[in-house]
Amino acid sequence: MPDKTRRIVVGITGASGALYALHTIRALLANGIQVHLVVSDYGAYVLETETGLSLKGKAFDDGLKERFGEAAVNGNIVRYSNKDLAAEISSGSFETDGMVIVPCSMKTLAGVAQGFAGSLIERAADVTLKEGRKLVLVPRETPLNRIHLKNMLAASEAGAHILPAMPAFYQKPNTIADLTDFIAGRILALFGIEAELFEPWRK
Ligand SMILES: Cc1cc2nc3c(=O)[nH]c(=O)nc-3n(C[C@H](O)[C@H](O)[C@H](O)COP(=O)(O)O)c2cc1C
């Protein structure tokens, strides 16, 4: 990468838990990472339902600033349409430090596990795996059926990291942000970023 900017692709899909995505994006930006963001149609729907944030125009950036403060969003978000399979992140020649899909629906999990690559999120995930880069999937569904479990195993066998949206409670969370930051912190840790978003367990 010529300018050595660290880039991570973030996919948001239509599983519950859009807040996990917002806290992950905030933490990546705070650590100087350029976020390449793709949101599926149902990702946008659930995002708006759960957080009130719209993706229309500048509303997303403005909403992040309102929520996390002006400094939290320094313009380092590059946005793509999930339909744009010709986008730069659709090609392995565009270097990134990897990708996280947070939250990851069972539908997108299935697409990734089977190499379907029919949307930009699925294609970018496919490219991430074929280039041997880090792919983190944050599935959220309960209970899980056998198809979900098999797809998680298939994605894991293909090289993806499965990081379920399962916050721990040993850090005695007081707020929802404590829970979402726990997951954001675990995601960043997989990328080798020490964000200190949660207290590691100590006896
Ligand atoms: C309010 C709402 C919540 C949903 N929650 C989940 C969920 O937690 N997990 C999941 O796998 N799908 C969930 N879905 C279903 C997905 O949005 C749906 O399967 C969709 O096709 C996913 O497409 P995408 O992966 O392209 O975003 C939810 C849908 C809605 C409308």
Image: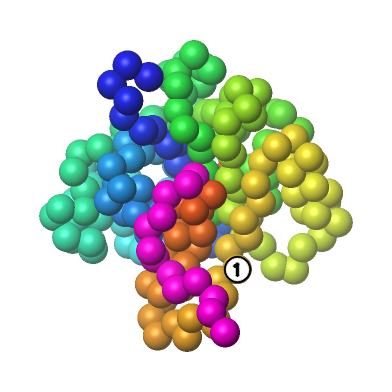
Q: Is residue 180 left or right of residue 51?
A: right
Give the position of the C terminus as an image quadrant: bottom right
Q: Secondary structure at mark 1?
A: loop
Count how many numbered circles sit on residues in the image: 1
Looking at the rendered image, the quarter that the N terminus falls into is: top left
**Residue placed at 67% from the left, 41% from the top?**
160
Q: Which range is magenta?
A: 191-203
Q: Is residue 192 magenta?
A: yes
Q: Is residue 192 above or below residue 86?
A: below
Residue at 38%, 63% (x, y): give it.
196
User: Which residue in the protein does label 1 denote?
Assistant: 166
Q: Residue at x 66, y 51 (%)?
A: 162
Residue occupying image coordinates x 42% and y 49%: 193
**Which image quarter: residue 167?**
bottom right
Location of residue 39 by image quarter: top left
Does label 1 point to a residue whose CB lies under 8 Å from ligand 1? Answer: no
